[in-house]
Each structure stands twice: as C-alpha cells, then as structure tokens.
Amino acid sequence: MNRVGRVERTTKETSVLVEIDLDGTGRTDIATGVGFYDHMLDQIGRHGLFDLTVKTDGDLHIDSHHTIEDTALALGAAFKQALGDKAGIYRFGNCTVPLDESLAQVTVDLSGRPYLVHTEPENMAPMIGEYDTTMTRHILESFVAQAQVALHVHVPYGRNAHHIVECQFKALARALRYASERDPRAAGIIPSTKGAL
C-alpha cells in the first residue's frame, strides 16, 4: 500500500501544498520563499528518505511567520495522512546528530497523542537570513499538533545558530524515518496494546 499524504491548505494569509511519500528516496522540491526554511525542510526529506514536495505562497510582505507556521501545519497533516492506521510500523524512533559544535537529540512516538518537549541553547542569534530562530519551536509545535505525535527535542549545547537549528531538523528527519518504517516482524500489527494509535 502506498503511504502518501497530500494536503492543500489555503487561508487569507497563505496557500500551501504538501505532498509526502514515506517510502521514497529523499527527493525534494521545496519552495516557501524563506531560504533557510527551505533548507531545513530539505533536511526532512533527504535524511528521512521521504519524497517531499512543499509549495507555499505566503504573506512575506508582512513577515515569514504565517508562511512558516502554515507550512508546518500542512506538513504534519500530510505526515499523519501518509501513516494511515500505522499498522506494521516501528512506532518509536530516536536519533542523535552532531553538527560541528552543536548536538541534537530527538525521540518520537507516533502515538496519536500530540506532545512536545523542546530545549535549545538560549541567547542564539535571533535571525538566520530571513528565518526567525524563535520559530523552530513553533514549527515543532505546529507539526506535532497536526501529526499527533509525541516529540522530544533536546539540544544540550551549541554556539552557531545555523548549526543548532539544522542539527534539530536532521535528527528529526532520522527519528521520523526510523519510527515510520515498516517492521518486518510485525506486518499488519498496530504497535499498541490499545489496538489503535
């Protein structure tokens, strides 16, 4: 069965299209108008081995907030759609990724229950290009709300803002990949004592 999600989301502020194939090869086609965010979404596809298309037209004449937030909401919804009933997946995934002086630790449970724990170094540079570094947490919050997953992201140390943010996205991609992959020993089995996720 194909594990593909497609979400179109249109408001007065943004128009977003997200398509994701969980069993892809890491092909990406990303265009949000926010260069650094495009780079981070590319990490999700490439390191998650998800084929990922993201096209967002947002009110960037105001700022990048709505564009970033609405894209994350659509990505979470598409990811949830692609997972289907979650039968036969590993469910849990974790990954630790270093990027030079920075380190990110990410653990995910595709539980059906949205919850986020997020810590990163304080006093980071406020901007990376047109990307507001305070948006990283908001991206994760938005994704978690729509994907309905429990996500713990911890950056114990780092100095360079680019590295601190990027290692989070790389670790997130890998953790999502590991959690959503099919478990050959549990084909057709939903990994929960409840019988549903």
Image (cartoon, grey):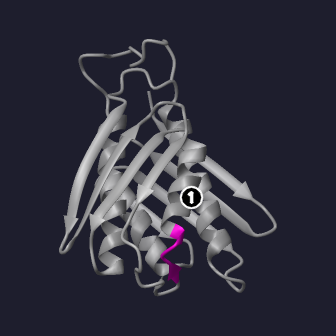
The residue at the point 43 percent across, 45 percent down is 151
Whether residue 182 is visible to the viewer of this picture, yes or no, is yes
Residue at the spot x=36%, y=21% of the render? 88
Under tag 1, what secondary structure?
Answer: helix
What are the residue bounds of the magenta stretch? 131-135
Q: Is residue 18 visible in the rendered structure shown here?
A: no
| Residue 109 painted magenta | no
Q: Quadrant of residue 110?
A: top left
**Percent from the top left, x then y, of residue 155?**
31, 62
Kind of residue at disc 1: Ala
The x, y position of residue 48, in whole percent, is 33, 51
* Count of numbered marks: 1
Quarter of the picture containing the N terminus is top left
> Does residue 72 lie above or below 115 as drawn?
below
Query: Position of 157 compared to 162: left or right?
Result: left
Return the residue at label 1. 72
Q: x and y percent of residue 53 in the render?
A: 49, 59
* Left or right side of 70 for 79: left
